[in-house]
Structures are given as structure tokens and as C-alpha cells.
Amino acid sequence: MRRQQVLLLYRRILQAIWQVPSDSDRKYLKDWAREEFKNNKSATEEDTIRMMITYGNMQLKELEKTLALAKS
């Protein structure tokens, strides 16, 4: 169950990153996301994983807000 949530979050973050207009910013964000998920891959505690998913969703919303502001 959590694995599906993590994979969905990762996909949604990558989809949002593809909307970033600058190639260098897009690469930086993609590398950042990959590194964050890679660093937390070994987490096994349910509460820790839930907290990281929540944090990831907050980061995604922040990125989406920034992209929406940049387009307007």
C-alpha cells in the first residue's frame, strides 16, 4: 500500500518537474527528487514513511504553486 503511494508521489513530482521551463532548473529538480527518494529508500517504520509522504506532498504542492505563478 505505501509502496504504491510512494511511486505515485514520485511520478507526480516528475510530471510537475517536466513543466519547469528552464532546462537547468528541470535537471536540478529531477536530480534532487531522485536523490531524496534514493536516500529514503531504506526507511521501514510506518510513521516515518507516512511523514515522508506528507512532506513530499507538501513539496509537490509548493512546486505546483510556483509553476502556476510563473505561468500567470
Image: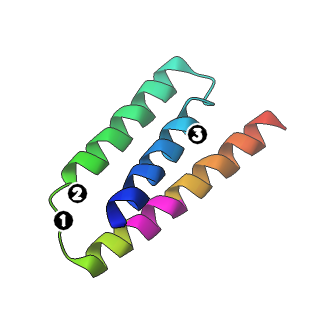
Residue 26 percent across, percent down from the top left = 49, 27
Q: Do the residues labelled 3 and 1 touch (CB within 8 Å)?
A: no
First reached walking from the N terminus: tag 2 or tag 3: 3
**Which amino acid type corresponds to the residue marked 1 in the rendered image?**
Ala
Disc 3 target residue: 16
Residue 71 percent across, percent down from the top left = 79, 34
Which span of residues is magenta-colored? 53-58
Residue toward you, 35 or 4: 4
Q: Farthest residue toward the bottom?
A: 47
The image quarter in which residue 4 lies: bottom left
Q: Do the residues labelled 1 and 2 touch (CB within 8 Å)?
A: yes
2 horizontally vs 68: left or right: left
52 horizontally vs 20: left or right: left
How far separated are the C-alphas under marks 3 and 1?
A: 25 Å
How far separated are the C-alphas under marks 1 and 2?
A: 6 Å
70 horizontally vs 18: left or right: right
Reply above or below: 68 against 31. below
Mark number, residue 61 = none
First reached walking from the N terminus: tag 3 or tag 1: 3
- Residue at the image position 30 percent from the left and 49 percent from the top: 36
Q: What element carries label 2?
A: loop
Disc 2 target residue: 40
Disc 1 target residue: 43
Reply above or below: 34 against 22. below
How far separated are the C-alphas under marks 2 and 3?
A: 21 Å
Label tally? 3
